[in-house]
Image (cartoon, rainbow, N blue to C red):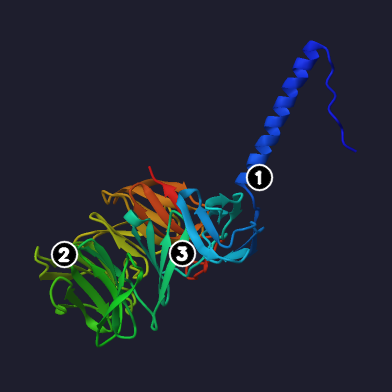
Amino acid sequence: MINRLRIPLSWPATAFSMLSVVVLLVALQGCKDDEEENPFKLEAEKISEGQILLEWTPVAGAFEYKVWRTIGGIGDPELLSSNSTSLEFVDDKLPQNSITYYITATLNGKEVQSNIVGITGREFLRILPYQMELIPEKNLAVIREYGAIVFVDYEKRLILNKVEFSGRIGQFGMYAHDGRIEIFVPSTDHNIYVLDADEMYRTDTIATDNTAYAITVNSQGKMFCSGGYSEIRVYDLEGTSSSTSIPAEPDCSLVLQDDQHLISVSTHLSPATMSYYTFDDNGAFVSKKDDPYAWEYEIDPERVDASSHFIATTLEDFIYTADENMTFVIKGTLGGISQTDFEFSSDGKTIYSANSQNKWITATTGITTAGISGTTFATTGYPWIMRRTGKTMIILSAPTAFLPTMRTDEVIIEKVTLL
């Protein structure tokens, strides 16, 4: 039954009713305009942890659809598909972030847009991390797995690319020059692979005559590489191939303090040993000094980092001076006994440690032989690996607690603002 509008003849009521009719007509016209702006409907469904299905109704007269996505409200919408003739699309490159989608089509020379749909992406990313380094100007995290390098946008929390290798890869180093950033990846297959950080693919190979274990590169283009030989090989990236070698333990981990100082920690000796190398301003080798300890203090090649002031290592955060004496200072106990990674403040005096059994990172300050002080910063997950950029810590965390010696492929990428 259709309800007809009756308008009384008295002047005030008539004027009021006429106004109501105008308002009703405007509202109806608004609905018509909305229909014209959104002539077709988009729906999104998460069909698996890594896939979202988009389906939309057809637009009469349109033969091609474009699929657009925005991640976490960051940046301009990105075009996922530009020539879709189907009425569905599967997005299988999901971030650990919120996502919005919409579809556009060209009709009579005019681009029309669907409704916007918001949906949650991955709960976590599938990564097996052993190392992470940041390229802050690109919001890029470069992550090492057992046999692959994974490139992740840490703002969008999205895996951009994955480069796989035939052998097991080790600690990689990065070198910025001529407006480019190159990544040098050592491998057990007797090669050092060179990756371009902009294009995120392999560009070159440096053959070696033994396994390559760990690499670090200073700002002068001196690349230090340890491997299955009792030496550290030094490559001059601005010159020609291998230039020299210095004595070292096989397969030692490497920490570059600055252009003139390098620290190595043995992996095949128990207890582990630590060595401090000094170079001149031209990169020539000057001296090597070994730590003076035997069983007194622990050193861990898997958990070690250094600043201009301190060396931090082990699950219990043993702290040494970062000089050729490598003097033991104190055992940092603020973070407990489950430290998995270390990072430093810009002045090198504060040690940040990741604790795999608690949802926080610890900032240790006031470090002297007499004692320490500090604070904690809450995290969403259980932190495993972290790197600092300015006053922000980028952290790879596990959603559930796990033993320090285990790896998990369920990773949360999170940011913590430091004081």
Where residue 242 sits, quadrant-wise, is bottom left
Residue 261: give x, y in percent of width and height: 18, 64
Q: Depth check: 179 or 397 in front?
A: 179
Q: Is 20 placed above or below 342 here?
A: above
At label 1, the amino acid type is Glu
Residue 39 in the image: x percent, y percent?
Answer: 64, 50
Q: Is residue 297 above or below residue 113?
A: below
State the separation of the CA atoms marked 3 and 1: 37 Å
Q: Which mark is residue 220?
A: 2
Total label count? Answer: 3
Q: Nearer the viewer, mark 2 or mark 1?
A: 1
| 26 left or right of 227 in image | right
**Residue 302, label in figure:** none
Left or right of 8? Residue 102 is: left
Q: Mark 1 — residue?
A: 35
Q: Quadrant of the N terminus?
A: top right
> Where is residue 96 drawn, in percent x and y?
52, 58
Residue under the point 57% across and 50% down:
113
Residue shown at 78%/11% (left/top)? 12
C-alpha separation, residue under disc 3 versus residue under disc 2: 31 Å
| Furthest residue toward right | 1
Say left or right for 347 vs 363. left
Label 3 SS: strand
Q: Which residue is mark 3?
A: 159
- Tell me what residue is drawn at x 54 percent, y 59 percent: 67
Q: Nearer the viewer, mark 3 or mark 2?
A: 3
Side (left or right) of 89 relative to 198: right
SS at circle 1:
helix
User: At x 75% / y 16%, what residue is drawn?
Assistant: 15
Kindly indicate the quadrant of the structure image that contains residue 196.
Answer: bottom left
Q: Quadrant of the C terminus?
A: top left
Give the residue type at disc 2: Gln
